[in-house]
């Protein structure tokens, strides 16, 4: 199980290195945080949009 976790951790770090691209490691947090906030904001707005799109039903 430990080797499985190590393999998974290695995969995650290699993907992070690919995504980082040309950014210096010290600047990485300045890039990730704004994109995380934008992603979360998009999720919230999508939930609000789908709530408005749902027709209201009345229970008799």
Image: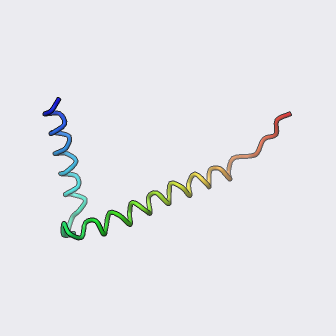
* Residue 57 appears left or right of 32: right
Q: Residue at x 82, y 40 (%)?
A: 58
Looking at the image, residue 30 lies above or below residue 43: below
Q: In the displayed structure, would residue 29 be above or below residue 12?
A: below
* Horizontal side of residue 3 vs 57, given as left or right: left
Is 14 in front, or is 3?
3
Where is residue 44 drawn, in percent x and y? 54, 55
Q: Residue 22: which quarter of the image? A: bottom left
Residue 34 falls left or right of residue 3: right
| Spot occupied by residue 10 in the image (x, y as percentages of width and height) | 16, 45
Q: Residue 28 placed where, x, y %?
A: 25, 66
Displayed quadrant of residue 29: bottom left
Q: What residue is shown at x 43% (from left), y 62% (from top)?
A: 37
Q: Residue furthest right?
A: 60
Residue at left 18%, top 69%? 24
> Residue 30 or 50: which is nearer the viewer?
30
């Amino acid at each position: 199980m430990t080797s499985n976790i190590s393999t998974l951790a290695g995969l995650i770090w290699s993907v992070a290195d690919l995504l980082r691209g040309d950014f210096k490691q010290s600047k990485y947090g300045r890039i990730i945080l704004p994109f995380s906030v934008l992603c979360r904001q998009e999720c919230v707005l999508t939930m609000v949009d789908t709530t408005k799109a749902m027709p209201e039903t009345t229970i008799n």
